[in-house]
Amino acid sequence: MTGPATTVEVTLRVNGEERSAIVEPRRTLVELLREDLELTGTHIGCEQGACGSCTVLIDGASARACLTPAFRAHGCEVVTIEGLADAPGTMSVLQQACMERHAFQCGFCTPGMLIVAAELLAERDDPSEAEVREALSGNLCRCTGYDSIVAAVLHAAERLRPTVDGAAS
């Protein structure tokens, strides 16, 4: 009789690049991302899924990477904060809007906030302030009071919204 597997191979697409690792079944996705794949933008906060700093997109839906076993991401598309920009060394419209609106102070909540904001903007091109606040409500920020973050997301939405000729403004 054989016992449970002590390691498992995980292959996933992270920020558009296929990556593989051998992990213990108990290893979390955030540990895989930070320690094995050296993508340290996703933060580890409460390790209970309450703060949102570890939020990533898995197949387009936000998920707490601290609660997600790494093996559950096998075969999935994962987007981290590093994957929001179109190219390395650049910023997405959302990241630029946050910088312009001084949306973050200490930066600890930033990865999770940007991921859930990106998810919202992918679903809705004209969110209301209430919808932005609702989308961000699962992520904790102890510095800004959220007003500047909400303003930045609304500013990004405005810039991303198609104009009459079909191009983003």
Image (cartoon, rainbow, N blue to C red):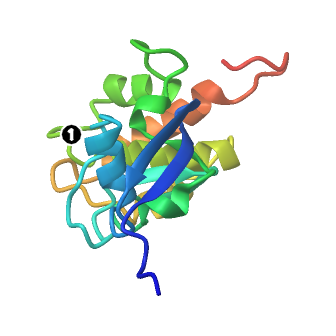
Residue 116 in sight from this viewpoint: no
- The residue that label 1 is drawn on is 107
The answer to which image quadrant residue 17 occupies is: top right
Find residue 21 and report its horizontal and vertical position in percent.
42, 45
Compared to 93, does 81 lie above or below?
Answer: below
Which secondary structure lies at badge 1? loop
Q: Quadrant of the C terminus?
A: top right
Name which residue lies at 43% across and 19% down. 91
Q: Is residue 47 left or right of residue 137?
A: left
> Is residue 67 or residue 135 the one in the foreground?
67
Q: Is residue 53 left or right of residue 81?
A: left
The answer to which image quadrant residue 160 occupies is: top right
* Most distant residue in the right direction: 165
Q: Is residue 91 left or right of residue 123?
A: left
Find residue 45 and report its horizontal and vertical position in percent.
20, 59
> How many numbered markers are drawn?
1
Name which residue lies at 59% across and 25% down. 159
> Is residue 21 or residue 159 the one in the foreground?
21
Find residue 126 and report its horizontal and vertical position in percent.
66, 43
Name which residue lies at 49% across and 61% down. 71
